Image (cartoon, rainbow, N blue to C red):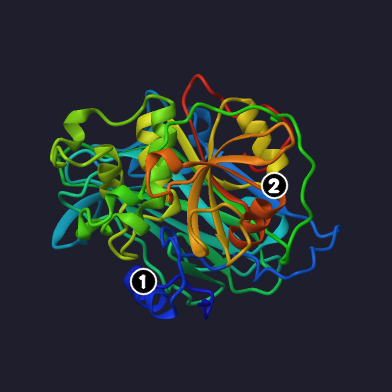
């Protein structure tokens, strides 16, 4: 099956279309190739993989933004002020609203895609909304588009995205903002609205950022092995398939849960899985009940799936301390993370015969964990599509995996870390 219109299909529609096509797929994070369909010829060597990640995390960084009804409080977090005058009615409730707006961020290229990430805390009936707008080289400015309405719980407000916003210079496809301008956009700006019930506890914004990119299309030339040859991290192995039929209201497990299963494997590696009390509602006969809980906490009620990239990193950040979505240029960059002790959740897609040894024959979108490299440079992964835990650990050909990853999702990864594992301190623009 193929995608049309460069739009992620709603999960149920994609599932039905895939079943009709007869393909064997893992529909965890259905995606459109970010840079066009892969071709048999490698992309031109001179075509740059332009990627830039920008983040506001510390108190000084957050203070460079503009506040309205919010303030930067102790610990480097943004909170709604006690006297915030803004009001908003949503889902028949009226909330106090405060906003934090980032400075304009310029890129050295005309960006065609942007994905935001954040870490926030939303006590009680509170939530946050993340928006973005862009500007062209000629100075035209787009409207703000919603990238996510997010809460760390689901008792009051439902986590969701708003696809289909395409009124002027850009459009939204689930969690990805895409430029409508042929030359791309040369700068962007985030706005975060924090909502709380009057007089109740405020949500707080700890970190926010975004990765902007402009990437070539076509297959890529296999990279040469780098600094992580022969290093494999001890990441626990969880299978998404053993959850088949679990919780239809959160995707029904099995094929739908590669993203929360992969996220849980990385959290398990850091020993930062949620406390048992958080998933005590899961029946005792469910293996790895924290995966069921992760699916619940990452479920996008508009998209109707658990494959929303920033929803997964926002969930992980609340447990491990740090997480964001970015794109890498090759497996050589991934090796820098493995060398630093940081496994990566990677988004891939491939057709029949394109990834030897995979537990599924093809997929329109799948998440797996890069855990290391062999001495020859091939990629060691934890692939949650295996039917059992024992089959999760796999080794994939370096060139095949690179071409299942870079031309399809643009090299998208979840970077999830704790304080003991800082990101590699090397020259870069994408982390």
- For the point 86% across and 58% down, which residue is it? 46
Label 1 sits on residue? 15
Q: Is residue 206 visible?
A: no
User: What residue does disc 2 label?
Assistant: 398
Residue with the most extreme right position? 46
Residue sitting nearer the eye, 172 or 410: 410
Alpha carbon distance from label 2 to label 1: 29 Å
- 313 vs 109, left or right, is left
Label 1 element class: helix
Residue 189, percent from left and from top: 54, 54
Q: Position of residue 84 (x, y in %)?
A: 26, 44
Residue at (16, 45) in percent of width and height:
198
Query: Helix or strand or loop: what does disc 2 sit on?
Result: helix
Left or right position of 353 against 9: right
Question: Where is 248 relative to 203, above or below?
Answer: below
Residue at (67, 57) in percent of width and height: 403
| Sequence-earlier tag: 2 or 1 | 1
């Amino acid at each position: 099956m193929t995608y049309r219109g460069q739009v992620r299909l709603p999960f149920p529609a994609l599932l039905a279309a895939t079943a009709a096509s007869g393909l064997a797929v893992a529909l965890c994070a259905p995606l459109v190739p970010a840079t066009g369909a892969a071709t048999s010829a490698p992309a031109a060597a001179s075509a740059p993989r332009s990627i830039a990640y920008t983040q506001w995390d510390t108190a000084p960084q957050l203070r460079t933004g503009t506040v309205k009804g919010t303030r930067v409080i102790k610990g480097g977090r943004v909170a709604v002020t006690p006297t915030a005058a803004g009001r908003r009615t949503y889902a028949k409730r009226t909330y106090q609203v405060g906003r934090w707006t980032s400075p304009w961020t310029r890129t050295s290229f005309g960006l065609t895609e942007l994905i935001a990430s954040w870490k926030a805390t939303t006590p009680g009936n509170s939530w946050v909304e993340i928006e973005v707008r862009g500007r062209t080289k000629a100075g035209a400015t787009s409207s703000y588009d919603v990238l996510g309405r997010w809460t760390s719980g689901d008792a009051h407000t439902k986590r969701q995205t708003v696809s289909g916003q395409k009124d002027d210079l850009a459009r939204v496809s689930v969690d990805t903002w895409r430029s409508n301008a042929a030359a791309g956009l040369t700068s962007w700006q985030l706005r975060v609205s924090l909502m709380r019930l009057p007089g109740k506890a405020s949500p707080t914004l700890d970190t926010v950022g975004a990765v902007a990119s402009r990437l070539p299309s076509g297959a890529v030339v296999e990279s040469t092995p780098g600094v992580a040859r022969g290093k494999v991290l001890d990441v626990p192995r969880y299978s998404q398939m053993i959850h088949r039929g679990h919780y239809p209201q959160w995707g029904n497990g099995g094929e739908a849960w590669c993203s929360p299963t992969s996220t849980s494997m990385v959290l398990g590696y850091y020993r930062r899985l949620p406390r048992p009390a958080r998933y005590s509602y899961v029946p005792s006969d469910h293996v790895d009940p924290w995966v069921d809980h992760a699916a619940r906490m990452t479920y996008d009620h508009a998209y109707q799936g658990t494959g929303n990239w920033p929803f997964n990193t926002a969930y992980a950040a609340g447990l491990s301390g740090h997480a964001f979505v970015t794109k890498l240029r090759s497996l050589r960059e991934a090796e820098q993370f493995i060398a630093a002790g940081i496994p990566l959740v990677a988004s891939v897609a491939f057709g029949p015969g394109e990834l030897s040894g995979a537990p599924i024959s093809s997929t329109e979108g799948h998440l797996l964990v890069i855990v290391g490299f062999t001495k020859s440079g091939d990629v060691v992964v934890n692939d949650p599509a295996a039917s059992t835990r024992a089959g999760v650990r796999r080794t994939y050909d370096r060139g095949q995996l690179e071409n299942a990853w870079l031309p399809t999702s643009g090299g998208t990864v979840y970077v999830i870390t704790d304080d003991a594992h800082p990101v590699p301190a090397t020259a870069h623009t994408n982390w």
